[in-house]
Image (spheres, grey):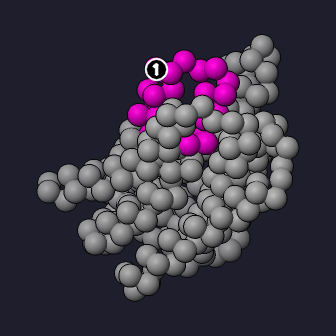
Amino acid sequence: MEDIFTVILLSLLPGAGNFLGALAAEARAPSARSLNWALHAASGIVIAIVAVELIPGALEQIAGWWVALAFAIGGLSYIALDSIVKRLQGTSDGAGNRRMWMIYAAVAIDLMSDGLMTGTGASVSLKWALVLSAGQVLADVPEGYAAAANFRSKGIARARRISLSVLFFVYVVGAAVAAYFLLRGAPGQIKAGGLAVVSGLLAVGAIEDMLQEAHDVHVDSQPSVIAFIGGFSLFTLVSAGLGAFVGR
C-alpha cells in the first residue's frame, strides 16, 4: 500500500505545475498578447509530448500501422468530443466559448497522460515515476496558465475558474492510480496502443483549438512563433535530461 500512496504524491507534481500556471493567470489579468504567447507555448509543449515521448514509445512496442490506427482513433475521438460539446452548448455560446472548453479538455487529457506515465512508470520503479513526474512540472505551467487565462478572457467567474483548475489534480491522480492498478500487469502492446490514442487526442487539440484560439485572441508575431519553439524545445530538453538520468 505504501507504493500507491507514493504514486499519488508523485502524480500531484504535474497537477501542481498546471495549478501554478493557473494562479499566475489569476494574479494578473493576461493581455491578449500574453494569452497568444501562452497558447503557442502550450501547443508547442503538447506537440513535443506527442512527437518526442508518446509516438516513439508506442513504436517501440507495436507496428507502425497499429500506431497509425490508434492515432486516428484518438483524433476522431477528439472530433466526436468537439461535436458533443458543440451540441450541448448549442449555437448561443459561439465558437469561442466552445473552443475554450476544448482547450481545457486538451490540457486535462495531457494531465491524464502524465498520470498514465507516472502510474505505469511506478510499476517499473518508483525512481522512474519520480523522474517522470518531476520532469512534467515545468512543461505543465504554460498549459495551466493558458487554460486559466483563456477562461478569464471569456468572463468565467473567478470561483469557477479556480474550481476548474483544482480539478486538474483529480485528472492526473485518477489516471495515475488507474494506470498503476490496471496497466502494470498489462501487455506492453496494450499500453503502447493507449499512448498512440492519447497522441491523436492531443495533436488534434493542439492544432485545432489551442493554435486557433491563439490566432483569434491576437495577431501572431515573431514572439508567438518563438513561444511555440520554446515550448517544444523546453519539453524536449526535459525529456532528454530525464532519459539520460534514468538511462533510457
**Picture quarter with the C terminus:** bottom left
Residue in front for this viewpoint, 239 or 112: 239
Direction from residue 189 to residue 229 in the image, left or right: right
Residue at point 63% right, 61% down? 231
Question: In the picture provided, is 124 more to the left or to the right than 219?
Answer: left
Residue 175 is a magenta residue:
no
The structure residue drawn at horizontal position 59% and vertical position 21%, both measured from the top left corner, is: 156
* Relative vertical location of residue 185 with respect to residue 173 in this rendering, above or below: below
Asked if residue 156 lies in the magenta stretch, the reply is yes
As displayed, is residue 183 above or below residue 55? above
Quarter of the picture containing the N terminus is bottom left
Region of the chain picked out in magenta, as a range: 145-168
Determine the main secondary structure of the stretch shown in magenta: helix
* Kind of residue at disc 1: Ala
In this picture, residue 150 sits left or right of residue 165:
right
Residue 41 seen in render: yes
Instruction: Indicate the position of residue 44 as horizontal and vertical percent values.
Output: 67, 59
- Residue drawn where x is 66% and y is 28% of the image: 153
Q: In the image as oriented, which residue stretches furthest toward the top?
A: 92
* Pointer 1 residue: 159
Tally of numbered discs: 1
Q: Residue furthest left?
A: 2
Q: Secondary structure at mark 1?
A: helix
